[in-house]
Image (spheres, helix red, strand yellow):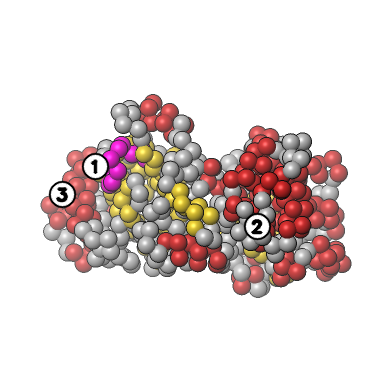
């Protein structure tokens, strides 16, 4: 029964065998949050909701949305760079870019273009369920020849019908005056809610919605991102961090001593969940002995430590530090230690990925941790490189069955076969530069991407499902992470409400 209107789901899927994809029907039957989203978008008017679901599911079957993959889309569509996901607005909504000047109306390619947009939306919906998008139409250097009203109407329908409650804002940047008449027509296609989300801006005031670091230079921003394919621009975590190859002038005996010293320094700081400001991780130049390192003034080790380190207590691993890795500006300050503690009764596999594998070396980047044991991970920034705001890291972990092998072949096969009900926790590390100090901030994120789920799923009153004890990614980086079940539902409700 639907909570708002008492309608039985069976009434929504009558005569569905030929009209809909059976996978969508199954999802509709199991996912109350999905149907509730349709109901909310249609103000709990049952007839309107039925029409919306019918239209949406027919569209999904017509465009074969469940089977859209990168290989099923013509390669030239990816290569043009006319549509892609990249960056965030000030409300932390992902930006969905449409470079209008790269679009040329052509009836022969209309279907492919529509499937291409569907590919991006479905990809994002699976990776970031429940998270809105901000659409940006970059109209710079565009003209009437670039306007395809049928295609624009399709994009609007995607958010109006096919993906309800998905649109945060639709920003039109630098629209030429000659297109005013066309956009007046567009407004007639939008409902009252959608019209309020439509923003016409110039490059002078777009920073009201998007910070400069997420804007290209021609909009007054500082983001040096240039689209290229392959890979896809949102493939943030596809490349594993490099483990092989020695760092220049690195002496292994000194590294071991230094790593041990750093571990003791950090472990002593993590006796409580909110630790006092720890000693900064310093790595010495060649010729400096570990004994000399211990005699260094403690204040020099603390230099640049902007925030206290914490221990993130996940359901599988405790991760230290929880909030930042600090790389100094000197060559001797290019390494940091991460400690993973297995808090389960079984072996836990983990792996690390990054957006910038050419910059960082991590040992180990893929391994396993025995029950009750800990693993030290050394993150090294290669010489000649600096951390940038676009660099991100990902730590994935999943519990293994008793007696599972821990060799490289076994681990590789394990990750291929991770059951859907075992949801790895994801931790995103974003870099920022503060007073010449490269800082990597850790944002905890509830990830149900790629269909992964945990065994312990409990519904909340307003937001659907969550793994017990998981940590929610906060809309504000200053928001307190939730690490226990106490207050989790309240925080999740607030987060969903803000979205």
| Mark 3 residue element | loop
Query: Which quadrant of the rendered structure holds the C terminus?
Result: bottom right
> Which stretch is magenta?
341-351
Residue toward you, 371 or 379: 371
Would you say 160 lies left or right of 256 here?
right
Q: Splitting the image into 4 quarters, where does residue 363 fall?
A: top left
Q: Residue 45: x, y in percent?
A: 73, 62
Say which residue appears at 34% left-offset and 46% top-offset: 316
Residue toward you, 96 or 178: 96
Whether residue 303 appears in this view of the structure is yes
Would you say 32 lies left or right of 424 here?
right
Question: Crowdedness of circle 1 by 10 Å Cα count: few (<14), some, many (20+)?
Answer: few
Say which residue appears at 62% left-offset and 45% top-offset: 29
Residue under pointer 1: 373
| Mark 2 residue element | loop
Residue under pointer 2: 6
Nearest to viewer (mark 3 / mark 1): 1
In the image, residue 71 sits, relative to residue 211, either above or below, namely: above
Would you say 27 lies left or right of 113 here?
left
Say which residue appears at 33% left-offset and 39% top-offset: 348
How many numbered marks does the figure carry?
3
Q: Which mark is residue 289?
A: 3
Question: Crowdedness of circle 3 by 10 Å Cα count: few (<14), some, many (20+)?
Answer: few
In the image, residue 187 sits, relative to residue 256, either above or below, namely: below
| Mark 1 residue element | loop
Question: Crowdedness of circle 2 by 10 Å Cα count: few (<14), some, many (20+)?
Answer: few
Q: Residue 354: x, y in percent?
A: 45, 46
CA gap, disc 2 and disc 3: 73 Å
Q: Earlier in the sequence, mark 3 or mark 1?
A: 3
Residue toward you, 403 or 370: 403
């Amino acid at each position: 029964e639907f909570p708002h209107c008492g309608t039985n789901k069976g009434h929504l899927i009558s005569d569905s065998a030929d009209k809909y994809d059976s996978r969508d029907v199954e999802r509709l039957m199991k996912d109350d949050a999905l149907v509730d989203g349709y109901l909310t978008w249609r103000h709990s008017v049952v007839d309107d909701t039925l029409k919306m679901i019918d239209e949406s599911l027919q569209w999904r079957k017509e465009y074969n949305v469940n089977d859209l993959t990168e290989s099923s889309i013509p390669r030239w569509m990816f290569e043009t760079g006319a549509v892609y996901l990249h960056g965030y607005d000030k409300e932390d909504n992902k930006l969905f870019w449409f470079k209008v000047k790269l679009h040329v109306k052509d009836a022969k390619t209309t279907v492919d273009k529509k499937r291409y947009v569907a590919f991006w939306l479905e990809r994002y919906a699976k990776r970031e369920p429940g998270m809105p998008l901000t659409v940006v139409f970059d109209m710079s250097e565009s003209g009437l020849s670039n306007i395809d009203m049928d295609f624009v109407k399709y994009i609007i329908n995607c958010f109006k019908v096919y993906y309800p409650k998905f649109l945060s804002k639709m920003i039109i940047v630098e629209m030429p005056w000659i297109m005013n008449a066309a956009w007046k027509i567009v407004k007639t296609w939008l409902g009252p809610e959608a019209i309020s989300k439509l923003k016409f801006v110039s490059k002078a005031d777009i920073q009201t919605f998007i910070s400069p670091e997420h804007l290209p230079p021609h909009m007054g921003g500082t983001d040096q991102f240039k689209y290229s394919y392959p890979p896809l621009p949102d493939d943030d975590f596809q490349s594993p961090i490099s483990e092989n190859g020695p760092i220049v002038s690195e002496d292994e005996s000194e590294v071991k001593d230094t790593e041990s010293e750093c571990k003791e320094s950090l472990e002593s700081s993590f006796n409580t969940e909110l630790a006092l400001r720890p000693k900064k991780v310093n790595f010495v130049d060649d010729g400096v002995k570990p004994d000399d390192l211990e005699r260094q003034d403690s204040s020099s080790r603390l230099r640049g430590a902007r925030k206290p380190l914490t221990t993130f207590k996940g359901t599988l691993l405790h991760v230290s530090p929880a909030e930042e890795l600090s790389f100094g500006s000197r060559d001797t300050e290019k390494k940091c230690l991460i400690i993973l503690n297995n808090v389960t009764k079984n072996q836990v596999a983990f792996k690390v990925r990054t957006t910038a594998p050419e910059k960082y070396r991590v040992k180990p980047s893929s391994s396993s941790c025995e029950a009750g044991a800990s693993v030290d991970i050394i993150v090294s920034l290669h010489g000649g490189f600096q951390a940038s705001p676009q660099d991100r890291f990902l730590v994935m972990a999943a519990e293994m069955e008793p007696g599972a092998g821990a060799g490289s072949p076994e681990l590789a096969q394990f990750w291929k076969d991770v059951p859907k009900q075992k949801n790895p926790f994801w931790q995103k590390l974003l870099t920022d530069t503060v007073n010449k100090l490269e800082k990597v901030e850790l944002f905890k994120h509830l990830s149900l991407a790629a269909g992964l789920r945990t065994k312990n799923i409990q519904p909340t009153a307003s937001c659907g499902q969550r793994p017990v004890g998981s940590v929610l990614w906060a809309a504000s980086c200053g928001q307190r992470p939730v690490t226990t079940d106490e207050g989790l539902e309240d925080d999740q409700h607030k987060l969903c409400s803000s979205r």
